[in-house]
Amino acid sequence: MKIASLPVPAPLIEYCEEKGITDLYPPQAACVDEGIFSGKSLLVAIPTASGKTLVAELAMHAQVANGGKCLYIVPLRALAGEKFREFSGKGVKVGISTGDLDRRDEFLGANDIIIATSEKVDSLLRNKTPWLRQVTLLVVDEVHLIASPDRGPTLEMVITKLRYRIPNLQVIALSATIGNPKKLADWLGAGLVTSEWRPVDLRQGVFYRGKIHFHQGEREVAEPSKTEDLNLCIDTIEEGGQCLVFVNSRRNAEGFAKRAAAAFKKRVKSPVLEEYAARILESATTDQEKVLAACIATGSAFHHAGLRREFRELIEEGFLKGEIRCISSTPTLAAGLNLPARRVIIRDLLRFSGAEGMAPIPVGEYHQMAGRAGRPHLDPYGEAVMIAKNEQSIEELFERYIDAPAEPVVSQCTRSGALCSHLLSLIATGFATDRKGLSKFLVQTFYGFTHASTKALDTIVNQSLKFLTETEMITEIGDLLQATEYGALVSRLYIDPLSAEAISGAMLEADGYSDRALLQVVCSTSDMPALYLKSKDLQYLEKFLYEHGDDLWQQVPWEDREQFYRSVKTAMLLSDYTDEVPEAIICERYDVGPGDLYAAVTNVTWLIHAAARLAAMFREDLAPAVRELEICTSQGIRRELLPLVRLKGIGRVRARRLFNNGITDPATLQEAGFDRITSILGSGVAKSLFSQFDEKETKERKDDLQGSSELVKKAQ
Ligand code: ADP
């Protein structure tokens, strides 16, 4: 099927042709036949790299040409950026919604395509963002994530709410790995396109003692090193390909990258790699980052959430350009990012999964990773390889993973704690005004669709409503369910009602205020992923509690102290951050990476923001201090720098430099004069600072003039 023959506007067709895309791939053509251009909903369950994104783009451009608006839901913030770049510059207006969770982002409504995570869409719904009603096409990327225990319920609720609110909404759901695609398609009222077709042949095999065993045939692998995983990797590099190695921990990812770097030293040389390494070294603050730079210089890299975002992006770019030859990664990289490689080695098939200890990875995840093998137009084939421990496990691995279908997608709505926040939002936003209304909504969810009996759901609804009534977040008078002012605020703030209760309860009872006390309470909630404990932590945690325990709002529990200690440890990390302890020291002290620190700071800032709003409702006397803490945590500064960071272009580093030079606020800064500020911060920054004062003065003068002319008018 020719792209040029499709009913989409010219810019997209021209863009495709420029990229050499003239014909649709067979599964894409099947989507056209199934009716994507006639507004029909579709579940597209086809392998990785078979062109799902273009299917979505075709449908979106056709909708926009007809005056429609599209919402594209991605699972990760990083993916939102990737999609934004991909969709821009093709004749449609694209917007990305990644801002604060209690904003309505009304300006985004001016766009034709809006990209957001499911959490952001949920918060937009809770804040009654007007443009959501104008959406005519909803694209859900990686729709199998409905089965994800922590994020699945939100995705399921968001899809249900949007379909409930917008009649005739076209839904295009995309996924590579689903065990029960028909069920999911039926729920969505959608047609189904499945296919095994791939643009590059994918060979899946098991490596054992120097040979990869495939369904058809075997392949010998040379043994230049003593380790099997490395031999598999070198084999691909020597052939001119690239390799992705999936392992089960960050430490293992780094370990493999170091071994690969040593092996690549004689094999890979490139000035571009040296430049990458130099770029990393320039801003590296931790030992881990210095190791990364050394690895990258030889074409090997590790990738995980602990790395800062710039470095992750640099690794991805270097790999896409073919410079970096091998990335060893935790499975996070398999979740969406478009980084194909000739050979994918799924090295670790067991992974630590909380209470269950080491457990085998799910089949769906194996397929996600394996699907990364083979770069279209660049590789003659793709290979996904597992490593067998003994001869008989070769067969077992074929059965368990290669020949097995992915697990069915199962709703996670009945998981403990998942529903309470959603029920509150349904009531607060008027989706349901009584229990009947709630039931009517809930039977529309995927859970309702797949369960004949809603008994389990009813029990959870009853328990949740009881909690919400007892905590005065909702009232039930006669049949009428209504959110109180408190409940409506909690829903808009996008925090778990349990977290809201913990925070407001602690504030209400507090005798005084301390940042540490609030941070610890916030870190004890389910909205804040707490750091894990290591045995060496206990000693300093106990010392800390001995010295500061009385400052805290929560008491040390008599039993089951682990959760409490974890919240204290996380609060200590954040206290260090607002105490301006250098990033490298924090990373070493708490055994985290800069990426983790950034994630914790972003998360806690949102919760402190919520705490400030709650304080304004319950403890007005505490609110100013909490608002200050919000700025301190977001910027990583002590309170004394607050007056300075209010100036545009002044962050934690510049503010500290000014402060240490005796300049403590805008007034002393102005008094010091341009030359002195230039000597501290350079002339560029000084110019921008003083122009802010000029602007302010002009504005004040204008306001004064306006004020006096109004007075004159009134007097006349
Ligand atoms: P998926 O989302 O299914 O994993 P993508 O949409 O990322 O796959 O597509 C993989 C690659 O294939 C992209 O580089 C895309 O530009 C390219 N592609 C998509 N459709 C076609 C086509 N019909 N012909 C040639 N290349 C295509």
Image (cartoon, rainbow, N blue to C red):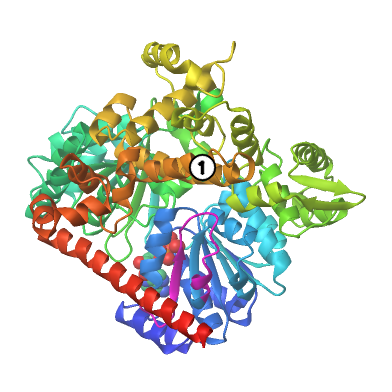
Residue at the image point whose x is 38% and y is 26% from the top? 389
Please, what is the three-letter code of the amino acid marked with disc 1?
Leu
In the image, 152 versus 681, the foreground residue is: 681
**Dominant secondary structure, magenta:** loop
- Quadrant of residue 633 in the image? top left
In the image, 569 versus 692, the foreground residue is: 692
Q: Is residue 106 magenta?
A: yes
What segment is highlighted magenta in the picture?
A: 89-109
Residue at the image point whose x is 60% and y is 66% from the top? 129
In the image, 97 versus 326, the foreground residue is: 97
Q: Is residue 282 left or right of residue 11?
A: left
Ligand 1 is in which quadrant of the figure? bottom left
- Quadrant of residue 590 in the image? top left
Residue at the image point whose x is 29% and y is 44% from the top? 308
Which residue, as the protein is rendered here, is positioned at the far front? 715
- Quadrant of residue 71 in the image? bottom right
Residue 621 appears in the figure: yes
Query: Where's residue 344, x and y in %?
Result: 34, 46
- Tally of numbered tags: 1
Q: Which residue in the protein does label 1 denote?
A: 607
Q: Residues within 10 Å of mark 1 (few under 14, many from 20)?
A: many
